Image: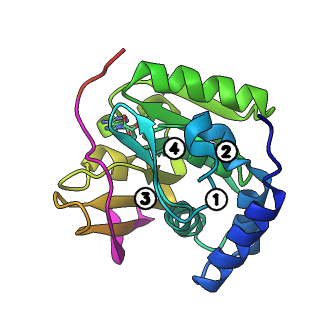
Amino acid sequence: MQRDYQWARRALLDRLEAQGISTPAVLTAIEEVPRETFVDEVQSVRAYEDCSLPIGQGQTLSQPYIVARMTELVMGGETRLKRVLEVGTGSGYQAAVLSQLCQTVFTVERIGAFLEQARTRHRYLGLLNIRYMHRDGFKGWPSQAPFDGILVTAAPDDVPLELKEQLAVGGRLVIPVGTQAGGQKLTVITRLADNEYQTRWYDLVSFVPLLPGELA
Ligand code: SAH
């Protein structure tokens, strides 16, 4: 059934603004992407609630506030970026939001079925500036590096060195770090120079773990 989600999307934007999301380009990107397209029919009525949603295989699509927050952090005050890497494609929603703000989004996912589903959803919405890779994202996407931003949507115990090294100078890595759900730190690492990084910590968050290896 086709529902009209326009009002719900507007209410979500008001809520995000009240929660402190202030970058106009990020709010516009969220307004442009129909979140209901990225969850199954049963979940779609909840697409605009401020909660995370199950997307199958024990994985979750983050709550809208966290998607907005991480997007804001990876943009770092810029309105447009050239190349951004996402690790953990999942439903494809975060990649779709990034596609509004970047020239090209590179997204890596260890579960092949998720990647195909995301690709289909993006095509359906006419989003053509996203590149896909079925791979364990601990190692990033070296052949496409350097990136102006890297956004990781699952939590490792420590920041993978390879990801830091794939940042362009001035680029930002946004990543939840830690083992304890609810106690992971949203971390932003900025590459200031070739061998100089700055680390800042933000919200406490709850992500699924970043896991090694690939699945079909
Ligand atoms: N950004 C997603 C959120 C997905 S949840 C969205 O918008 O829906 C986290 C995702 O990270 C899951 O799909 C999980 O399979 C994936 N993941 C976990 N470990 C990974 C790894 N090492 N490499 C790539 N993807 C990984």
Check disc 3 and report its element: helix, strand or loop: strand
Chief secondary structure of the magenta portion: strand
Q: Earlier in the sequence, mark 4 or mark 2?
A: 2
Residue 114's x, y, as percent? 48, 26
Check disc 2 and report its element: helix, strand or loop: helix
Query: Hey, what amino acid is under mark 1?
Result: Tyr
Q: Which mark is residue 48?
A: 1
Q: Measure the alpha-carbon separation of dots 4 and 2.
A: 23 Å
Bounds of the magenta segment: 189-212
Q: Which mark is residue 36?
A: 2
Residue under label 4, please give it. 85
Q: Is residue 83 left or right of residue 181?
A: right
Closer to viewer: mark 4 or mark 2: 2
Query: Hey, what amino acid is under mark 4?
Result: Leu
Check disc 4 and report its element: helix, strand or loop: strand
Q: Is mark 3 within 8 Å of ligand 1?
A: no
